[in-house]
Amino acid sequence: MSVLIETTLGDIVIDLLTENRPRSCLNFLKLCKIKYYNFCLFHYVKRNYVAQTGDPTGTGNGGESVFRQIYGDQAKFFEAETNPRIKHSKFGTVSFINNGNNMHGSQFFITLDEDLDYLDGTHTVFGYVVEGEDVLQKINETVCDDRYQPYRDIRINHTIILDDPYDDPAGLDIPDRSPEPTSELLQSGRIGADEKLDETEGKTMEEIEDMSKERKAKAESHILEMVGDIPDADMKPPENVLFVCKLNPVTSSEDLEIIFSRFGNIISCEVIRDAKTGDSLCYAFIEYDNIEDCEKAYFKMDNVLIDDRRIHVDFSQSVAKMKWDMFKKSKALSNAAKETDQTKLQLKNKHVEQKKYDYVFDDDDNNNETKKHHRRSSSPERAHRQKHKHRDASPKRTTSSKYDRREDSSRRERYEDDKKHRHRDRYSDRDDHGHRGKQGSYKAHKPDKNWRSSDKDYSKDRDSYHRRRSPRR
């Protein structure tokens, strides 16, 4: 009672526990027989834990038992077998996955370590891997993402039943041959199982060197783009420009143009000179009107003697002129955009939105308002107030109390104000001579002329007067 599973990494042979798990083994054998597991992904691989497969969707949420094909949708899952209890104590233990309701479908896993006792009692063990432990080690060492999904597909290509003790149930549809995989089934968004990662395989040394040089040049161009030396990494030097070096310092641009003009029309010919001294740097750039003339000059003028110097001619590899031309174009476009914006602003300023609508009788209303304003301003007090309006710019003090906390008043002003109020509160019931008025009255009364008539009254008034004048406790 064994099954051979062919994977993309090798073959695995599983021995089934048909006596202890008859229903689980029947489900697994018949699913292998109808080729249900063909091209299923190992969608969950956690190192030194488990490798999970058996879901045709490759998501971990699909799969169904073979009994659904026999009995209908109500038999999509079957009940787990718990007796006898078999532990996950060996490397390569094969178990059906519990879907949460103590039910199983088609998904199963293979343990990648020993003594995984925390899986006991939840998932049903129905077999062991007896051959292909090296394949399990490869699966265990595969590189996965944070969701434990392998970056490169690991699939079950085919299943072969070596020994089947169960009869085929009625209603089971067994195909004559293995089905062909569909494009949707093989598209997992990962590196394909048959995809070659080694690009040098089957190539000669020259081709490999050319490939490495091309990659190096592309990397250097990206670096030049990042540092700002070239505007674009894909920019190529112009094919109609020649680079001429090893010139004699006395050779001028006019001389070179006369010599090279016999091959075709020259757009520009420039000997590069020092910016400060103006001395020739002994190299020049010659730009032709078309590429054919440039190629003729390259083949004919290389190693030619000019002014007692043998010059060297090559195609230009510089993009400085193209960069400068692009800079000038971008600057011209930005200037044009600025002029357009200024024109728009001028037009906008011409048509400023008015805050007030014009009415039919607007002139009459304005005249009436002018008359009313003139009438109001006719009084001398109002005219004086309008004339000296800047003096009253600060808000007026509306209250004068020691609890005044206005933000525009300084600490000194508040102190003087409180001092003034304390003086008024203390002596508010006295007259100009310091005499008290009647009780409860703030009006000072005139003292009686005969207020010194008796010593008793005099001493009483004197004590009360000095007591009132003493500092408060």
Image (cartoon, rainbow, N blue to C red):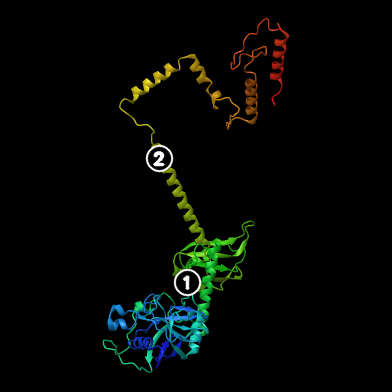
The span from disc 1 to disc 2 (Cα, nearest Å) is 56 Å
Name the spot of residue 327 as percent of width and height, x first: 50, 56
State left or right for residue 29 relative to residue 72.
right
- Which residue is labeled 1 in the image? 295
* Camera-nearest residue between 286 and 27: 27
Amino acid type of disc 1?
A: Glu
Q: Residue at (31%, 89%) from the top-left corner?
A: 177
* Camera-nearest residue between 465 and 305: 465
* Camera-nearest residue between 47 and 109: 109
User: If you read the primary sequence from the N terminus, does the residue marked by circle 1 or circle 2 appear first?
Assistant: 1
Name the spot of residue 5 as percent of width and height, x first: 41, 88
Q: Residue at (26%, 86%) from the top-left corner?
A: 171
- Which residue is labeled 2 in the image? 348
Q: Residues within 10 Å of mark 2 (few under 14, many from 20)?
A: few
Q: Is residue 443 visible?
A: yes
State left or right for residue 254 relative to residue 341.
right
